[in-house]
Image (tube, rainbow, N blue to C red):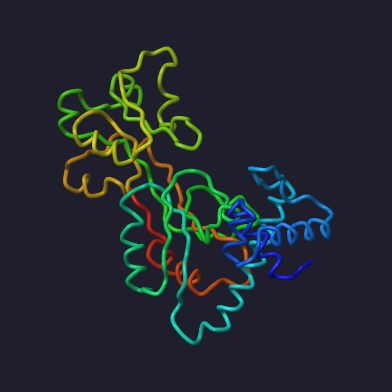
Amino acid sequence: MEGLGGIAMFVQVADSGSFSATGRLLGLSSSAVGKSVARMETRLGARLFQRSTRHLALTDEGEKFLQRCKRILAEVEAAEQELSAASGAPSGRLRISLPRYSGLFEPVIAGFMLAYPDIELDLDFSDALVNVISDGFDAVVRTGELDDSGLTGRKLCTFRRLLVASPAYLARHGHPAHPADLARHQRLRYRFPATGRLEAWPLDDTLEPAAPLAPGMVCNSVEMRVYLALQGQGIAYLPAFTVQRELAAGQLVSLLDAHTQPVTAFWLLWPASRHLPPRLRVFIDFLVQQLQDQTYGTRP
């Protein structure tokens, strides 16, 4: 191999999708960059890019090699920062992916920025599935269990989802006493942006398959469903932490609590590595300290 320089050049080409753009960044000609990649392909005995006059795309082998190369560069960077960590406070850029759920992570992120002003945060709020390594994230927060052997994870908090409606809506339409009563109520449903499927409600299997449902609404926004529930437009099924203030103020009421007991966990995930950059280590520790062992929406 051509050493770390060749690996870094390959990663830059893959990220930019262009020999010429990489050359401008490194002060080289596009021909020199292309020859470096060609030499790497010859040594590996595998084609890393599909080339045309207007397009440059990674092959399957190139995609796999890219993930390995990014891990190698991350390890080298982490080792360098570990050696120099004692000389000053953690600094540098962290690219983090967080879920779009509102109301939980904002104060934690604000607190982290105050505690570590030399760390630059690049935050991506999305419910889409991401590949932590190939998409270039230092860490992601997602729900569900850890199922990627290439990642390390720490469990943060857990939360319930609650069925909620406004007192005004319940005054007009009545208070559902049994799960089957939901069939006659307007439901404010959530559609997952990544898959297009509807979020399942915990009581769907109690409804008669042929029973006509009352008109409702479907969207991919937590905020919109909170707003419409507050306006008396229907019943929403929402993470408890998104409506804590509204429930405490009596603006919303939780319904059928005995039937909404399951909890979901948030996990913080990052690429497995023996050497974590100090900026990532303090970010992990801060989120765990602020959120771990808290459960939102659990009834005593």
- Residue 268 appears at what percent x and percent y? 49, 58
- Residue 273 appears at what percent x and percent y? 63, 67
The residue shown at (58%, 83%) is: 83
239 relative to 87 in the view: left or right: left
Q: Is residue 95 above or below residue 92?
A: above
The residue shown at (71%, 62%) is: 32
Determine the image quadrant of residue 2.
Answer: bottom right
Q: Is residue 65 above or below residue 287?
A: above
On-image quarter of the N terminus? bottom right
- Residue 111 appears at what percent x and percent y? 32, 67
Report the front residue among 241 and 127: 127
Q: How many numbered marks does the figure carry? A: 0
The residue shown at (20%, 48%) is: 248
The residue shown at (53%, 61%) is: 138
Report the front residue among 65 and 33: 33
Q: Is residue 175 above or below residue 10?
A: above
42 relative to 154 in the view: left or right: right
Determine the image quadrant of residue 261.
Answer: top left
249 relative to 212 in the view: left or right: left
Q: Residue furthest bottom?
A: 87
Report the front residue among 265 and 134: 134
Report the front residue among 97 and 58: 58
- Residue 26 appears at what percent x and percent y? 60, 66
